[in-house]
Image: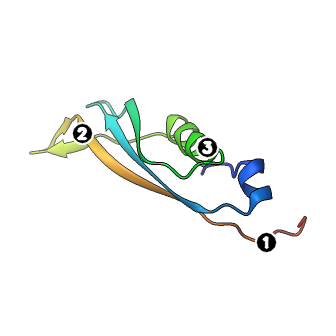
Amino acid sequence: MPIYPKLARRLGKEGIVLLRLTIDERGRLRDVEVLKKAGSGLDEAAIKAMRESAFKPAEKNGKPIACRVRAPIRFVLRSTAND
């Protein structure tokens, strides 16, 4: 899960960051591309969260293969007990 950036929270910024992930046949993240930005630190938070994630490789005919995946990361402000 991405950590909501303080700047975006302070500005009341919400949005969707669309990423394209390249995952190899071992499930390792090889590349992250931003296809749609949201700004205010949300893009960087989404990338960081994906780089810290674990992935299972895609399979074709029962064998692991490299793949590209589009990953929309939605940032929505929620009220917390500390607000």
Q: Which mark is residue 79?
A: 1
Q: Is residue 57 left or right of residue 60?
A: right
Q: Residue at x 25, y 31 (%)?
A: 25
Q: Is residue 10 left or right of residue 66?
A: right
Q: Position of residue 8 (x, y in %)?
A: 71, 53
**In the picture, which quadrant includes the C terminus?**
bottom right
Asked if marks 3 and 2 touch (Cβ < 8 Å), the reply is no
Residue at the limit of the structure toward the right, as seen here: 82
> What is the three-letter code of the residue carrying label 3?
Ala
Q: Residue at x 76, y 49 (%)?
A: 7
Is 71 rendered above or below residue 34?
below
Say few, some or many: other residues with alpha carbon within 10 Å of mark 2 (under 14 / 14 to 19 / 20 or more). Answer: some
Of residue 62 and residue 50, the one placed in the foreground of this image is 50
Q: Nearer the viewer, mark 1 or mark 2?
A: 1
Q: Is residue 52 left or right of residue 36?
A: right
Of residue 30 and residue 75, the one placed in the foreground of this image is 75
For the residues labelled 1 and 2, the Cα–Cα distance comes to 37 Å
> What is the three-letter code of the residue carrying label 1?
Ser
Q: How many marks?
A: 3
The local secondary structure at tag 2 comes to strand
The local secondary structure at tag 3 comes to helix
**Which residue, given by chain and number where applicable, does mark 2 sit on?**
67
> Going from the N terminus, do you reach mark 1 or mark 3 first?
3
Of residue 48 and residue 18, the one placed in the foreground of this image is 18
Q: Residue at x 80, y 57 (%)?
A: 10
Residue at the limit of the structure toward the left, as seen here: 61
**Which residue, given by chain and number where applicable, does mark 3 sit on?**
45
Q: Residue at x 19, y 36 (%)?
A: 65
Q: Position of residue 26 (x, y in %)?
A: 31, 30
> Going from the N terminus, do you reach mark 3 or mark 2 first?
3
